[in-house]
Amino acid sequence: MIERETLTGMRELIEELEAKLHEAGVVSARVEAEWLLAETLGVRRTELYLWDGAIPSAQREQLRERLSRRLSGEPLQYVLGAVEFLGHRLLVNPSVLIPRPETEALAVEAIAALQALVASGRETVRVLDVGTGSGCLAISLARAVEACAITALELSWNTLQTARANVLAHHLDDRIHLIQSDWTSGVGGLFHLIISNPPYVPTAELARLPEDVRREPRESLDGGADGMAFHRRLLMDAERLLASSGTLLMECAEAQAHPLGQMAQVTSWAKTARVIEDLAGRPRGLLVEKRSWIG
């Protein structure tokens, strides 16, 4: 039906796309069929079923090309070139980790912490985003809390350019400072909040990831032997980088949340450590508060 210039019905086209995606092993075939078609036509998914008439030839060709890429195993978000994160549209490509709904819970916790600081009378809150990737966390925090001054770190130059494009698209280049850095090695000063979605897949499990996930940057996935190598580095670095009573937030895998909480509790600088749950109620992160008498 993609070959036809006119349609007998949008529903039939969606069903055809769904069947092709399902045959290729795509789990959410119906949803992805709608996304492919909606993005190609420039409409909302809910507006697809109101479409009446022909699809222009240029868009039919684009749909065929996008479908072919998805059927080859390329992630849907890379095929479409964009993703929504907390309602903000972000450019994505193979140089960046794809922002996921689980990370939104981390952003929500950070926003609440920053809003509390502003409510207490602090005019500017300094934030460090370690491994910014697409810039999804930095942009979400800056959009929600105007008093934010954010330093966003990224090792990969190509990834940093994608983050820069997103920062510019959201007109936040005056409040988000992007720096190419190997983790926190080139950063000094004190921050009220440090946030990170570090690599946390154990190295041995990388080969068992779904094919589309394996298309994402390995350096954004590989968290070392137990998946917690970068979390340990953050727990060490936070002592010198967090201001008194500052907050550290890290995303992690479900099985890592409680072990990381135990690690944090035995550090000399941590006052409290609390597991963060995602929207489905699963443990997917850690919030650590620094003691007020340190730093």
Image (cartoon, rainbow, N blue to C red):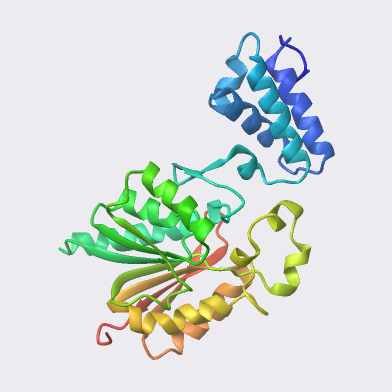
- Return the x and y of residue 128 as percentages of the image width and height: 36, 67
Image: 49 above or below 30: above
Image: 231 above or below 61: below
Question: Can residue 48 be seen at all in this image of the molecule?
Answer: yes
- Return the x and y of residue 80 as percentages of the image width and height: 60, 37
Q: Residue at x 68, y 80 (%)?
A: 225
Position of the N terminus by quadrant = top right
**Is residue 169 or residue 124 the one in the foreground?**
169
Position of the C terminus by quadrant = bottom left
Q: In the orientation shown, which residue stands out farthest toward the front?
A: 157
Q: Residue at x 25, y 52 (%)?
A: 146
Q: Where, by quadrant of the figure, is residue 69 drawn? A: top right
Question: Can residue 271 be seen at all in this image of the molecule?
Answer: no
- Return the x and y of residue 254 as percentages of the image width and height: 61, 68
- Return the x and y of residue 60 as percentages of the image width and height: 68, 21
Q: Is residue 116 left or right of residue 154?
A: left
Counting labels gives 0
Q: Where, by quadrant of the figure, is residue 35 drawn? A: top right
Q: Residue at x 46, y 90 (%)?
A: 266
